[in-house]
Image: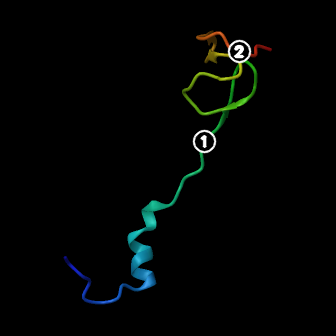
Amino acid sequence: MANPKRKLSRASKGHRRAHLVLDRIQLVRCTHCSSMIRPHTICGNCGYYRTKQVVVASNPN
């Protein structure tokens, strides 16, 4: 089994892991009920996608 020859410094480890940071979830307002949803998804509150009702929501306004 391979073992490292030298100790890896915190800075080198941080440079390697720099792309592993988590991004915030992007949210936009629903055009129909104004609740916050992820873009390009059906609203879970009202069931609309853009201006069309796609699914019947369980709790309509």
Look at 65% across and 16% down and name the residue there.
Answer: 47
Where is residue 5 drawn, in percent x and y?
A: 24, 88
Residue placed most toward the observer, 59 or 30? 59
Say which mark, if any, is on residue 26: 1
Say which mark, if any, is on residue 42: none
**Residue 59 horizontal side relative to residue 20, left or right:** right
Q: Where 9 sits versus 48, above or below?
A: below
Residue 14, picture quadrant: bottom left
**Disc on the earlier residue, 1 or 2:** 1
Dot 1: few (<14), some (14–19), or many (≥20) neighbours within 10 Å? few
Where is residue 42 drawn, in percent x and y?
A: 59, 21
**Residue 55 horizontal side relative to residue 13, left or right:** right
- What colour-coding does the image apply? rainbow
Say which mark, if any, is on residue 58: 2
Image quadrant for the C terminus? Answer: top right
Image quadrant for the N terminus? Answer: bottom left
Q: Quick one: which residue is furthest to the front in this view?
A: 1
Dot 2: few (<14), some (14–19), or many (≥20) neighbours within 10 Å? few
Q: Secondary structure at mark 1?
A: loop
Q: Where 8 sits versus 1, above or below?
A: below
Where is residue 41 drawn, in percent x and y?
A: 56, 26
